[in-house]
Amino acid sequence: MLINVTCVALNYNHLPQTIPSHFNIKGEVDGYGDKSTIFILIVLHIGITALLNWVGNHPEQHNYPIAITDENRAQQYKLSSQLVQRLNVIIGLLFTTISLSVMFPNFPTEIMFLELVLIFLDLS
């Protein structure tokens, strides 16, 4: 998240007034907005990071596919927290890639596909 915020802060003044705001499934730009719209990505990134940090720190609030007992509680809580932490990192990479794609038109958007694959592999 800090890398994303720093990249946007350092490059904001160099952005054109109109920047890509939406990409289609092929990674092609199909929507534009004012350069200030990049802050929507930053706010979402910060919000999702904060939410996932909270969720990861409260494994007792998670739903589990098995009954939680005194014997398996510590292990299940640890596994659940680790999953949320990994997802937080991968989602952070995805937000950073999206920001970089908006700021630098030649940035390879194919990286987003790999990050999405990582999310689904981690969940399986």
Image (spheres, grey):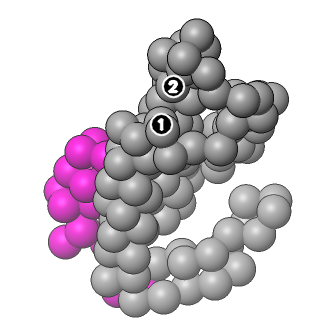
Label 2: element kind: helix
Residue at left offset 33%, top offset 70%: 43
Across and down, in percent, residue 89 comes to 46, 35
User: Is residue 114 found left or right of 5 in the rendered image?
Assistant: right
Task: Give the residue pinned by disc 1.
Answer: 59
Task: Give the residue pinned by disc 2.
Answer: 77
Q: What amino acid is found at the position of numbered circle 2 in the picture?
A: Tyr
- Circle 2 packing at 10 Å, graded few (<14), some (14-19), many (20+), is many
In the image, 70 versus 74, the foreground residue is: 70
Query: Residue 122 — which label?
Result: none
- Circle 1 packing at 10 Å, graded few (<14), some (14-19), many (20+), is many
In the image, 75 versus 48, the foreground residue is: 75
Q: Quadrant of residue 36?
A: bottom left
Label 1: element kind: helix
**Which of the marked residues, 2 or 1, is nearer the chain's N terminus?**
1
Residue at left offset 32%, top offset 59%: 46
- Can residue 23 be found in the magenta stretch? no
Residue at left offset 36%, top offset 48%: 54
Quick check: 15 above or below 111?
A: below
Q: What amino acid is found at the position of numbered circle 1 in the picture?
A: Pro
User: Is residue 105 found left or right of 49 in the rendered image?
Assistant: right
The magenta span reads 1-18
Q: Quadrant of the C terminus?
A: top right
Magenta part, dominant SS:
helix
